[in-house]
Amino acid sequence: YRELGESERALDLMQRATERSAGERLPIQLSYHFTSIAHICLQAGRIEESLEHYRAAVGLTRRANFVPGLSLSLRMLGELLLGLGRDAEALPLLEEAARLFAQLGDRVGEAELWEEIARAHENAGRDPDALSAWAKARGLRHEQRDAAGELAAVEGLGRVTRRHLAEPSLALPHYRDAAAIAAAAGDRRTEGRLRNVIGILEYQRQSYAAALEEYEAALDAFSACEDAEGVGLALNSIGATLRSMGRRSEARDALARALAYNERTPRADLLGHTLGMLGAVEMDAGAPDRATPFFERSLAIRVESGDTRGEGWMRYELSRAAAASAMRDRAREMLESGVRAAQDCGDAELGEACERLRRTAGL
């Protein structure tokens, strides 16, 4: 009946079996019976009954000191509570289960549990706890020679370190390890994505030469696996970095190549960034007339995709271009709409840029 999807009928039969045989079964047998009932209750949407039966299975196996059954019962109860958003109840159970899996020598199950624990802490912003759990998971996956599992754990360490610590570049060793693991596994797409992240971190600390090297490695990886979106992303990054290095002609060439890729992919965000950067390069060259069409195309994409922050920045750039062309009414119009966008999306940096432009251009 359970396999036929008739949960209520299956539950009725299981409960009748419990009533008739409870006194004859060993606690170990009864615990598996309770977990089966709990699972059927869950399928039927009877959450509290499911929790009650999982707790009964935990209690029975704990009293019987039956570690295999206790570890599984704790895991099932913890995972259900976690899925219900009841982390405070779930996490102690999952941690106890992980310790029992370790006691049983089940390193795969132990690693899976620490990964669940890490994700729960990460999602809730409990970064020190997340770092500790991801580190445990990484060690276990490395011990198992599970490259995919270790890669996921190292990325977790990188993400949390980047978010948690005042200096995001402290995440670089984790991302470099992750990129090396991906490269060794022949996963060029993941390697490219990670090289791009490393490039961003290097760029943020103004290590432009190091960033450019990483972006070029990302481009090579994406090209090798024929990932057109990845190629467009890497070329955008290369163009932005070359611009910051004052290598305007090379930046323009890289962005022109990016445009050719990004116009053929469904990623409107990549195309919007390409066009915006091409406009910025032309503004650097003192050519607001050439910059304006790029900004206008980028603005249209941002508006259509609902990217309020990107829309605000393009309105700021159009105001800057109009001011440079002595089109003061147009400059004011774009500046005011940029200010409104900054307020709508809470972008303080954009708001400050608009106010600086208002002062310097006398708008």
Image (cartoon, helix red, strand yellow):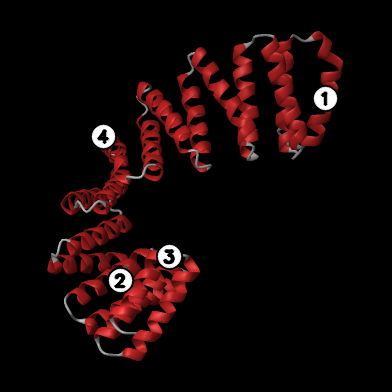
Query: Which of labels 3 and 4 is toward the front?
Result: 3
Secondary element at tag 1 = helix
Numbered mark located on residue 15 in the image = 1
Disc 1, disc 2: CB below 8 Å? no
Locate the N terminus and report the quarter of the image it occupies: top right
Report the side of 272 relative to 326 (left or right). Answer: right
The answer to whether residue 298 of the structure is visible from this angle is: no
Q: Amino acid at mark 1?
A: Gln
Numbered mark located on residue 58 in the image = none
Query: Which of labels 1 and 3 is toward the front?
Result: 3
Task: Choose the circle earlier in sequence order: 3 or 2.
Answer: 2
Name the residue tied to disc 4: 184
Instruction: Tell me how many marks there are.
Output: 4
Q: Amino acid at mark 4?
A: Ala
Task: Choose the circle earlier in sequence order: 1 or 3.
Answer: 1
Name the residue tied to disc 2: 276
Secondary element at tag 3 = loop
Q: Amino acid at mark 2?
A: Gly
